[in-house]
Amino acid sequence: MNAERIATLHVDGQEYKLPVLKPAIGPDAIDIRKLYKMANLFTFDPGFTSTAACDSTITFIDGEAGELLYRGYPVDELAEHSHFLEVCYLLLYGELPNQSQLDDFEHRVTMHTMVHDQMTYFFRGFRRDAHPMAIITGVMGAMSAFYHDSTDIADPEQREIASIRMIAKLPTIVAMAFKYSIGQPFVFPKNNLNYAANFLHMCFKVPTEKFTAAKAVSRALDRIFILHADHEQNASTSTVRLAGSSGANPFACIAAGIACLWGPAHGGANEACLLMLREIGSVDRIAEFIRRAKDPSDPFRLMGFGHRVYKNFDPRAKIMKQSADEILHELGDSDNSTLQVARELERIALEDEYFQERCLYPNVDFYSGIILDAVGFPTDMFTPIFALSRTVGWISQWKEMIADPDVKIGRPRQMYVGKRNRHYQPVKAR
């Protein structure tokens, strides 16, 4: 990026010239990298909501226009016409693959879905009621103890091997965490199934029965994977980049991202949405909760409506709504009270002036929670499935950062507001 303009900062009679960088899309950025050296000044930006910590070619979000692009492609277009592993290739390598490239990539992922047999002992060390996110965070970090041949981040080939392994093995690990939590035996992956169908097979197959995932269910899950694959520099992605900037191995970096995603303010939104729908319970109670949502003195708020980034509409929601309608028709859950509440809330949000004026439309979390519940996943599996989806985005961002010749170890500054210089006093004198 070249500086096309200059910003001038005036402080205490001094003038400082700062380059203004112009990205491919989006707002310009003032380059403050030399500000501390020039002026002995930092910027103060809690949450880094007005600070770009890197440049990237992977994902672009325009919250005002309701736009999300993967490598320049609209995410709704990819979800409609592509499939998850093709999107993985796009995020990892920057271009959509031709047929031979796609076949090779799918083969490499499929051949790495098994996990080392000794890793099963890790699961047995957890309490039977351990949260699946606790399990997958630990197991992902432990992968560095099993795959020593892909931890050298200076070796491009090892970075590639590690990337494929994580994309391939996390569905197996997440499915194993699910099986462990419900007391069922682990199910091995099947190489003749696609990515989403294989995950469903590992989650819902039992030795005593045959299992074949319905096509509508498999397709809906594949879309969930695509729509959650990356989302620019969110909290978990920034965590992965920060961990990676220290030179940590890739498995540790992705484990850090999973741990961050576990936070209810980040990856737990669809779970919180479904719990809200269950709290409402029936259609005749919706008016009460709508009144509470509109009352500024009431702390209650509707989960799954609006979005911190998207000020107009969530571009992922349209595709997710389509999948929700398809899967609910397939599964025949017309008598489900939770779904009836969801549909009535959706109708109100699309028609009520209060919601329209504030752009509080149903977002991707609203629909994904409904789909995962209908498929048969308990709410504590929602965030692990989110982590499975986001792994390719984390890896793509990590690889981009490692290959950047200007990368520096992350070191945010602070504005100290504590005590000034004090002197130690012996305990008897205090």
Image (cartoon, rainbow, N blue to C red):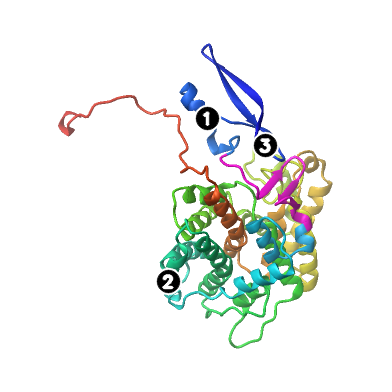
Q: Secondary structure at mark 2?
A: helix
Query: Where is residue 168 drawn, in percent x and y?
Result: 58, 69
Residue at image coords 55%, 38% = 47
**What whole-number distance in Å separates the C-alpha atoms at marks 2 and 3?**
48 Å
Front tag of 2 and 3: 2
Magenta-colored span: 53-77
Q: Secondary structure at mark 1?
A: loop
| Amino acid on which disc 1 is placed | Phe
Instruction: Provide the residue designation for mark 3.
Output: 296
- Relative to 241, is 287 on the left or the right? right
Above or below 32: residue 340: below
Query: Where is residue 52 drawn, in percent x and y?
Result: 59, 38
**What whole-number distance in Å separates the C-alpha atoms at marks 1 and 2?**
43 Å
If you read the primary sequence from the N terminus, does the residue marked by circle 2 or circle 3 appear first? Answer: 2
**What whole-number distance in Å separates the C-alpha atoms at marks 1 and 3?**
30 Å
> Hey, which quadrant is residue 312 in on the image?
top right
Above or below 214: residue 163: above
Instruction: Provide the residue designation for mark 2.
Output: 122
If you read the primary sequence from the N terminus, does the residue marked by circle 1 or circle 2 appear first? Answer: 1
Front tag of 1 and 3: 1
- Please give the label number shown on residue 44: 1
Quadrant holding the C terminus:
top left
| Amino acid on which disc 2 is placed | Phe
Whether the magenta-drawn stretch holds residue 200 is answered as no
Whether the magenta-drawn stretch holds residue 71 is answered as yes
